[in-house]
Amino acid sequence: MAEDIHAADGGIRLTELEVRRRTQRNVAIAVALASLVGLFYVMTLVKLGAGAGLMH
Amino acid sequence: MTDVSRASALHISTAAPGDYIALLKPRVMSLVVFTALVGMVVAPSATHPVLMAVALLSIAIGAGASGALNMWYDADIDAVMKRTANRPVPSGRVAAGEALAFGLVLACGSVLTLALAVNWLSAGLLAFTIFFYVAIYTMWLKRRTPQNIVIGGAAGAFPPMIGWAAMTNSVSVEAIVLFLIIFMWTPPHFWALALLKSEDYARAGVPMLPVVAGETTTRTQILIYSVLLVPIAVVPYLIGLGGPVYGGVSMLLGAAFVGLALNVKLAADAPALRLACRRLFGFSILYLFALFATLLSERVVHLLIGA
């Protein structure tokens, strides 16, 4: 069993499933972060727009 | 050794993004989103559509965070109940600590985003709702009293009030009425399910009413709450929040609700009781959806005609 788990350098070698799931989680986090950036950008534009409207 | 058990022994996550979405209890979330949306739309004032969407998203994520924190705390009892054994934490796909961190981050993020997008009152209500669901219901009441879902039901009743507060920056009688409808709806809805799943709850040691007080008391309580619910559900019509269509729908469906609750009360044997409970449980979801959908439709039609 140890041969399955550990790479030659003594570290843990991930299985195909573990690598695939990690990649999926990374992509999901990237999408979530990018969406948050977009969300706050649009929110700021709307709020600034409303503020500008009040000044006129 | 399977991939999952090996990964779990080595503390390597095999969780897919879908497992984290499952932590948010998407089905509960959809009801929260819908009732919060109705609270927003029927409110007398409105804000920019983008900010409305952000507010709705924040409320949804806040509800999801409550779900994740609930699954973190309840993993031990979820593991012994058939209905919940395959949830991400008890099945080992997501570690308990990860669910906790995920829930906390989303809870803080959703409350702050709601505050930035609309106002602090709605954000405060959202924070209180999350606290109420996690600390008061999940940690305190759920394992201690058969009144768990009566008091805990408040957590599920807050979303329309949060939606209303997000639009008006206030909590008025109308918002309280919307709250009360869901609050009174929760006991008959959950007890119908609890009667069907009482063995599961007993095995998990959760003192649901059928487990502690027995079937007869539960059936009586279902009927009492149903009879109390129906007039409260008509109040939006009486105070002008809903129009005549809402008045008719709430009375007709209310009569059906009481009829089905009466069937549960009078069921002669076990198969009849199971059937009556299943019918009441299914109808209760349709009932709440129909009430709020009618309020929403009337308001949208009013806005379209007014415009």
Image (spheres, coloured by chain):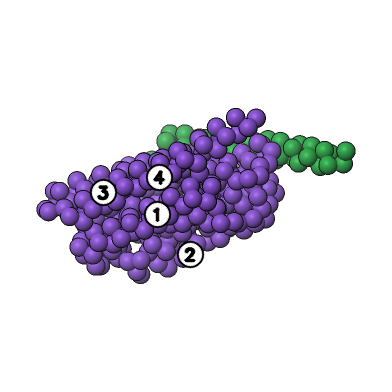
Chain colours: A green, B purple
- Residue B252, position in %: x, y? 35, 43
Amino acid type, label 3: Gly
- Which residue bears the numbered disc 1? B231
**Alpha carbon separation for disc pair 4 and 3:** 14 Å
Question: Could you classify mark 2 by the number of other residues whose Cα lies within 10 Å: few (under 14), some (14-19), or many (20 or more)?
Answer: some
Q: Earlier in the sequence, mark 3 or mark 2?
A: 2
Which residue is at 25% across, 61% downward? B220
**Alpha carbon separation for disc pair 3 and 2:** 35 Å
Q: Earlier in the sequence, mark 4 or mark 3?
A: 4
- Residue A29, position in %: x, y? 57, 39
- Which residue bears the numbered disc 2? B135
Amino acid type, label 1: Pro
- Which residue bears the numbered disc 3? B259
Check if mark 3 and mark 1 are on a common chain. yes
Check if mark 4 and mark 3 are on a common chain. yes
Q: Chain of mark 4?
A: B
Which numbered tag is attached to residue B250?
4
Q: Chain of mark 3?
A: B
Question: Could you classify mark 3 by the number of other residues whose Cα lies within 10 Å: few (under 14), some (14-19), or many (20 or more)?
Answer: some
Amino acid type, label 2: Ala
**Alpha carbon separation for disc pair 4 and 2:** 33 Å
Give the secondary structure at mark 1: helix
Question: Farthest residue toward the bottom?
Answer: B144
Q: Chain of mark 2?
A: B
Residues B220 and B54: in front is: B220
The label nearer to you, 3 versus 2, is 3
